[in-house]
Amino acid sequence: MAKKFESTERFLKPDARYHSRVIAKFINCLMRDGKKATAERVFYSAMDIVAERIRGAAPNEVFDQALNNVKPLVEVRSKRVGGASYQVPMPVNAKRQMSLAMRWVLTAIRKRKGKPMAEKLANEICDAYRKEGAAITVRENTHRMAEANKAFAHFAW
């Protein structure tokens, strides 16, 4: 039986500079009001800043490693059992890991104030690469919550 929904990344064209579908997806998520050229300019400017700050590594590899550091392994989901709601820890599939990592990085840079968007994005990517920063904090909190509710794992569906 064929899958009902196909992955969007399969039909997504790779980005112009790094030829990566993950980067193309991130640029699409970064985009606001259909302004893709602006989103691309912000992302590539951030990559130039990352290249200056982290010598010896290609900026697209730094970006990939940063996203891998932000990806959650487990998350908690609400499960209603007998009138009570439990936070049940569940493993996260690869596609959702990537979308959560991108969402958390974008949320973190949009919360930062006082700097140009490219600089905020470069700071967050460098922080995530070094396993620190707001997106890593969200991941750690998610893992901590799953660890705390491990007693309810038998409710997983």
Image (cartoon, rainbow, N blue to C red):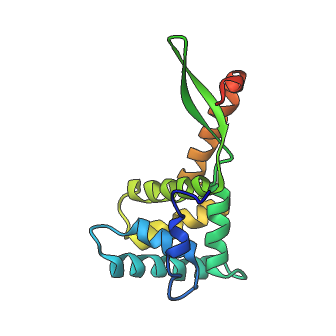
Is residue 49 rendered to the left or right of residue 117?
right
Q: How many marks?
A: 0
Q: Farthest residue to the front: give it.
A: 1
Q: In terms of depth relative to the viewer, which is nearer, 38 or 49?
A: 38
* Nearest to the observer: residue 66 or residue 33: 33
Residue 91 percent location from the top left of the image: 68, 42
Instruction: Determine the residue positioned at 57% across, 58% down.
Output: 3
Q: Residue furthest left?
A: 33
Could you say where residue 72 lies in the image, as x and y percent from the top left? 64, 48
Image quadrant where residue 21 sits: bottom right
Q: What residue is drawn where x is 62% and y is 32%?
A: 145
- Rendered view: 50 above or below 155: below
Please give the name of the residue rendered at 54% of the width and 11% of the height, measured from the top-left corner: 82
Q: Quadrant of the N terminus?
A: bottom right
Residue depicted at x 38% and y 66%: 115
Residue 111 in the image: state x and y as whole percent.
39, 53
Q: Is residue 136 above or below residue 59?
A: above
Taking the image as shown, residue 54 lies to the left or right of residue 14, namely right
- The reply, left or right, for residue 112 in relation to residue 6 is left
Q: Reply above or below: 111 against 130.
A: above
Instruction: Please state, as top left, top right, bottom left or bottom right, where the C terminus lies in the image.
Output: top right
Query: Residue 46: percent from the left, percent from the top?
Result: 49, 76
Task: Indicate whether 5 appears above or below 148.
Answer: below
